[in-house]
Every structure is written in C-alpha cells, then in structure tokens.
Amino acid sequence: MVIPNQRQYPSGTVSYVIRSGDTLYSLAARFNTTVQAIIAANPGIDPNNLMIGQVICIPQPVGPPTCPGGRLYTIQPGDTLFQIARFFNVTVDAILQANPGLDPDNLVVGRIICIPGVAPPTECPAGTVPYIIRAGDTYYALAIRFNTTVEALIAANPGVDPNALVIGQRICVPQVAPPTECPAGTVPYIIRAGDTYFAIAARFNTTVAALIAANPGVDPNALMIGQRICVPVTVPPAVCPAGTVPYIIRAGDTYFAIAARFNTTVAALIAVNPGVDPNNLFIGQRICIPQAIPPVGCPPGTMPYIIRAGDTYFAIAARFNTTVAALIAANPGVDPNALMIGQRICIPR
C-alpha cells in the first residue's frame, strides 16, 4: 500500500509499506524508478533484507513518464518486450533506450512505458488501404490476395518486419482500383473453387500465356476464390463460314465423334475452328462443322441406307450380299469403325 507523503519523507517521494514478495527491483519497476533512486531516498536501508510492514520512501515523478515523439503504453498481462516491439514496429533496443532501468525480462503489469517513434497515421497514404493482420497472414499471401507484390508491401510499410507480423497489427496495402471493365478483347471472370489458369485457358479457348499477359501481377499458382481476372476471348462470328454449320458441344463430344457423326474429318474440323483445342472441348462451346450438301440420291448402282443401332459394315455387307470393301468404296470419307445412328451411307446393289 502507498501512504500519502508525511513531513519526514523527502519531497518528490511517497511512502510505501513493504509486502510479501517485494524487492527493491520489483518496486522500482512498478513505480517507474530505479533501485539506486530508492536506495538514495532511503539511507541505511538493506535492499537484501526488506521486512514485511517496513515503511520506505519511493521516488515518484509527477504524472506519467514523458515520451516525446512517441506514445505511452501500459504493460498488459502476458506482454513481453519483444511482442511490444513487434506490435509497434520498433526495436527492443529502442524501447530500452526510451525507458532507462526497464528490465526486459521482468515487465510489471500496469507499468507505463514509452514507445519511441511516430504514432501511426490515422489513414494510410494515398494509393494504399489499411489492413489488420490476421492469423496465417504473410506478405506473400497478402500480395496475391490484393494483386500486388511483396516488394510493394515492404515499400508501403517501412519498419515493418515481413517475417514477424503480429495478429492485430495494422499495415498499409498498395491497391490499384480495379477497372470498371476489363480491357478490350477480354472479359471479366471470377475465380471459383478448383480453377487453374490451365483449366480457364481450355474453357475459353485461350492460352495460359495469354491469361498471364492479360493479368499482370496475378500469380497463376495462387489464385484466390472470388478474385477477378480478365480472360482474353475471341468473339465468335454471328454465322459460321460458308460451307459449315454451327454446332454446340454436348457432354461426351470429341472431334473424332463429331467428325464421324457429320461425315467429315478431324483435320477438317481443326481447319475451320482455329484456336479451338480439340483436346479441351467444353459443354456449351460453339464450333463450326464442315458440311457437304448430300446428294438427292446415292450414286447409280447404290441405294441409301440409314445406320441403326448395332450396325457394322460387316453386318450390312452380309445383309445386302455385298462386301466390306465395296461399302468402303461407295462411301469415301466414312469411317467404318465409327458409324453413328442416323448416319446415311450408300449400299452397292
């Protein structure tokens, strides 16, 4: 307990009654003074033999400690000087210099100390936004999330150690306001779970290189759900070129199956659909199908036949008393190993 000053105590001190566990060292820390100052104010005192109930004088400055150019901080339970230094973006040495006599290994809860440095601004500088560090945050993850770089974060936060971020710490994040619209020749796209640049490139008939070029600063190996990117696209023509018809890709479609179904070839499909990856077709994608106008009737000496379920050239040849070779000759361009139900062929008579 502290007893109000009596006339026998020197000016600038307060009286204090020693309690169990008290030491001059702990008292000096608690009252923001030093052991030497307590000894000087109590001539004849034995610092190694304090007695419970003994009354001593504690030098006490008027008001809280001064802290020019910095801010005052009250020690909280669990605080360490290292944590305090990290939180305020200063060094342990700077705090010790600003607080003579402070023992970094024996902080006293409730003691007011001076944190040197300039108090953080109310707002982050122009071109940046404030951000409060959360569990798991790193400069690398933040750079990805905000489409910036680690270097830009470091430049915007001088004195912050990127390898020792503290939960609740405030930093400033460089931010480029996203454009209202993506650049000409691209469309906006919001990243969804499972997305990769490779999958997106395949879905939109573009390339990973084109995606990277259209999204500078975005790390393709660390896409974030909800992140917006711009996807290069080629607007399909309103009408397919002459000699072709439009076709919408359905589940299970392949160029080989489509070519067989429409009596064309994979090479012809590739030729009329430049930029389309035949190995990465997606449902809803539009392609153009080369189409020859079928003759009114089959050539002389043949008759038309519509392929049914289970048909093969071998079965058809047996049914119509012809040969597989004759069927192949009468139907150039038809793959006998990929007949499609509804496909029309010509049967030699």
Image: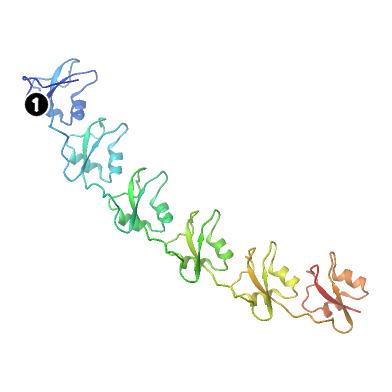
* Residue assigned mark 1: 40
Check disc 1 and give the amino acid type.
Answer: Ala
Left or right of 182, for residue 255: right
Against 259, residue 161 (above or below) is above
**Looking at the image, which residue is at 37% across and 46% down?**
133
Against 45, residue 96 (above or below) is below
Residue closest to the eye, 298 or 101: 298
Where in the figure is residue 15, as x and y percent of width and height?
Answer: 13, 21
Where in the figure is residue 76, as x and y percent of width and height?
Answer: 29, 33
- Quarter of the image for the C terminus: give it: bottom right
Where in the figure is residue 72, as x and y percent of width and height?
Answer: 22, 39
Within 10 Å of disc 1 (Cα), the crowding (few <14, some 14-19, many 20+) is some
SS for dot 1: helix
Looking at the rendered structure, the number of numbered marks drawn on it comes to 1
Left or right of 244, for residue 128: left
Against 344, residue 161 (above or below) is above
Against 27, residue 86 (above or below) is below
